[in-house]
């Protein structure tokens, strides 16, 4: 059955599969507890609200006997950090430039799950894609799909680091795979690449300093000392992933839906979007979930960091925005542009 399942998973478009027991990561609960106690989850209160389920896959669904972890590749073409040099444009993380992976991966998981029910004669399943209290990365490591690197993301010797994770919990007993171990060695490339020093130590992340968290999860104004470090990143950040040497083994994405649709949009265009315009611009994209106000706030930080006085009138128009965080970001952007101009820092020389 396991061999047939593996073949079917690859036929469905997944790039890798591994199996573990629901209780395969007993240390996950204590690690999560320490993380929450340190406050490193920031405003992500949902992590604490479902701590019990998140810390134990066995507690989430006691009837489950196996967890099938699946990888789906979204490897970008070229170096995603090259867009950081385009100061009049915003940088969107690679995973969010195409269609929403939640929809694409879940659809594939459901098809595979239905196949398993039919093939196994009536087992039960539940599928999860990043929206339930499941610690996908520790489970994926336990299932042998890869290991959590020093940047805490999952790495694979066969796939690199550009892949999504999905999970199928099932009541079917399946032989587990051998857990993977770390192959990072002495490398610190991902830690050195982080613009905001979000890693207190290898294998530890303080989300409160992570640009992905700041641009997507954080509500309200971002701390002033972090804004200048965000550069023109307006949704997510790929720097630590892009720096990883294991990406030399990355494979091309098979799903056409991950092809870029968003690209590197012009800051001036995004800054002036209203709610309806924002929803239309990012329909079907993961970007849509943050809403117009948070996006425009991020765009204004990018405008301030651009060193381009020609963008000042755009920020000026948003000084009286109905959202307080947007209005405050507009004022900051104007001050930042003025400061960079006084310091003689132009678009080409801006170090952020």
Image: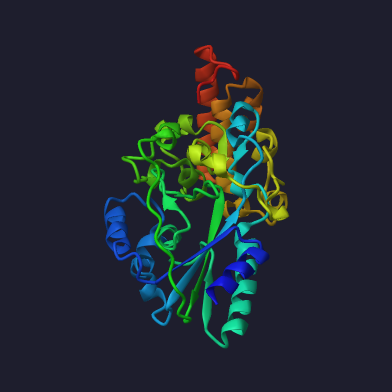
Look at 62% across and 72% down and name the residue there. 112
Look at 38% across and 80% down and name the residue there. 62
For the rendered model, the colour scheme is rainbow
In this rendering, position of residue 118 left or right of residue 261:
left
Query: Along the line of sight, which residue is nearer the eye, 49 or 185?
Result: 185
In this rendering, position of residue 112 left or right of residue 161:
right
The N terminus is located in which quarter?
bottom right
Q: Is 67 located above or below residue 178 in the figure?
A: below
Residue 6 figure quarter: bottom right
Query: Along the line of sight, which residue is nearer the eye, 153 or 338?
Result: 153
Tell me residue 269's x, y (percent).
70, 37
Q: Is 96 located above or below residue 348 in the figure?
A: below
Q: Is residue 237 visible?
A: no
Q: How many marks?
A: 0
Tell me residue 23's x, y (percent).
35, 71
Query: Along the line of sight, which residue is nearer the eye, 208 or 263?
Result: 263
Look at 52% across and 79% down and name the residue there. 125
Look at 55% across and 16% down and name the residue there. 349
Q: Is residue 204 visible?
A: yes
Which residue ends up furthest to the front in the rendered image?
3
Query: Along the line of sight, which residue is nearer the eye, 62 or 90?
Result: 62
Q: Is 176 located above or below residue 252 in the figure?
A: below
Tell me residue 104's x, y (percent).
65, 62
Residue 188 figure quarter: top left
Tell me residue 341's x, y (percent).
55, 15
């Amino acid at each position: 059955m396991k061999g047939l399942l593996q073949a079917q998973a690859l036929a469905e478009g997944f790039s890798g599969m591994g199996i573990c027991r629901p209780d395969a990561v007993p240390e996950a609960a204590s690690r999560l507890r320490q993380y929450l106690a340190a406050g490193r989850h920031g405003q992500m209160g949902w992590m604490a609200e479902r701590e019990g389920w998140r810390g134990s896959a066995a507690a989430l669904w006691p009837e489950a006997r196996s967890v099938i972890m699946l990888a789906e590749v979204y490897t970008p073409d070229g170096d995603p950090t090259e867009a950081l040099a385009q100061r009049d444009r915003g940088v969107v993380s690679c995973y969010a430039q195409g269609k929403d992976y939640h929809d694409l991966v879940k659809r594939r998981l459901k098809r595979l799950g239905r196949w398993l029910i039919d093939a196994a004669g009536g087992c039960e399943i539940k599928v999860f894609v990043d929206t339930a209290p499941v610690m996908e990365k520790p489970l994926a490591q336990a299932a042998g799909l890869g290991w959590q690197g020093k940047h805490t993301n999952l790495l694979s010797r066969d796939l690199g680091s550009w892949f999504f994770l999905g999970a199928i919990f099932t009541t079917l007993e399946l032989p587990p795979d051998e857990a993977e171990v770390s192959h990072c060695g002495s490398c610190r490339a991902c830690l050195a690449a982080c613009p905001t020093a979000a890693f207190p130590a290898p294998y530890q992340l303080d989300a409160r300093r992570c640009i992905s968290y700041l641009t997507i999860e954080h509500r309200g104004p971002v701390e002033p000392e972090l804004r200048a470090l965000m550069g023109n990143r307006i949704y997510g950040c790929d720097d630590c992933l892009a720096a990883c040497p294991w990406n030399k083994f990355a494979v091309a994405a098979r799903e056409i839906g991950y092809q870029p649709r968003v690209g590197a949009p012009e800051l001036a265009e995004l800054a002036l979007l209203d709610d309806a315009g924002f929803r239309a611009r990012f329909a079907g994209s993961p970007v849509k979930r943050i809403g117009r106000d948070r996006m425009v706030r991020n765009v204004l930080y990018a405008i301030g960091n651009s060193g381009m006085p020609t963008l000042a009138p755009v920020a000026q128009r948003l000084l009286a925005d109905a959202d307080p965080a947007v209005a405050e970001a507009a004022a900051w952007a104007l001050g930042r542009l003025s400061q960079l101009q006084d310091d003689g820092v132009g678009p080409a020389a801006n170090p952020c």
